[in-house]
Amino acid sequence: MTSITGRTRIFGIIADPIHHVKTPEVFNSLLAAEKADGVLVPVHVTPPGLADMLAGFRAMQNLGGFIVTVPHKPSVVDLCDELTEEARRVGAVNCVRREVDGRLVGAILDGIGFVEGLRAANIEPKGMRAYVAGAGGAASAVAFALAAAGVASLTVANRTEARARALCERIAVAYPELPLSTDAARVADQDLIMNATSLGMQKGDALPVDAAQLHAGQVVAEAIMHPAMTPLLQAAEAAGCRVQPGLPMLENQIRLMAQHMRAF
């Protein structure tokens, strides 16, 4: 895109806070590479304003869709008119297409983005003992995607264990043979550890896992993109782990997001 005109299609990303998002740079670079007349802009929306914001999006005739991130992924589910099967199963949405009649169609692409990001780095999750910190929208998507990828076992760790158990119960319906756990303490037993919480975005945040249990041979991954090297990844690197920052997760789902929103 060289200029914005009256024909330019608008896309957005909604978040609270918004300053940390890397999506506009990546998405707009893709639009430019595809010579698509569109632009994606950051939209700061707090939870009390979410429903009003989506009502406004419905009325925007030149809006192609929008991307959803923390903390809105679970809340947007009930504000969409239609969901993909995966979004319904996960209970979260991170990409919404606006149809010409104003209907909003939600999808969840975090999980496949994470798994494909691992594979692009020559890390195959199949057969790994996996640990996901968090039980929110991104964590749910990642957990389902890891189950689909064939991990040997899956632990979901969350500050509120009841939420972790609820997620495991949903996963068990779709993958009844997969060994599941909510034992947050067993970090050392894992091959792959993924932080899908927001811990690490703010200075002074606690670590999402017990770093004393990290050791060489493990892969430690992040969903957070800013900072690129979170305190967890720094601790993991110091322990001899292989680290996977958050940006590849975005880069490997951004084209899928563009396709869902029919950006080109």
Image (cartoon, grey):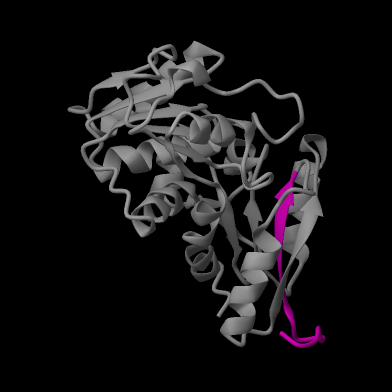
Q: Note whether 149 is above or below 181 in the view shown.
A: below
User: Quadrant of the image for the N terminus?
Assistant: bottom right
Residue at image position (67%, 72%) is 28
Residue at 70% in and 63% down: 24
Write the start and end of the magenta stretch as one range: 1-15
Q: Is residue 71 above or below residue 59?
A: above
Task: Say above or below: 170 vs 22.
Answer: above
Q: Against 13, is 196 above or below?
A: above
Q: Confirm whether the magenta stretch covers residue 93.
A: no
Tell me where residue 114 appears, x and y as whole percent: 44, 49
Q: Please report the residue visible at 56 percent of the width from the left and 15 percent of the height from the top.
A: 159
Q: Is residue 156 visible?
A: yes
With 15 as the anchor, is 241 left or right in this view? left
Name the residue nearer the viewer: 81 or 50: 50
Along the viewing direction, whichever of 64 and 19 lies nearer the viewer: 19
Q: Is residue 195 visible?
A: no
**Would you say residue 3 sits in the magenta stretch?**
yes
Would you say 77 lies left or right of 108 here? Answer: right
Residue 66 image-quadrant placement: bottom right
- Residue 36 lies, in percent from the top left, at 62, 84
| Residue 101, horizontal then vertical, whole percent | 63, 68
Left or right of residue 110: residue 112: left
- The residue lying at 73 percent from left, 75 percent from top is 62
- Residue 116: x and y in percent read 38, 55
Count of numbered badges drawn on the protein: 0
Left or right: where 13 falls relative to 77: right
Quarter of the figure that contains the C terminus:
bottom right
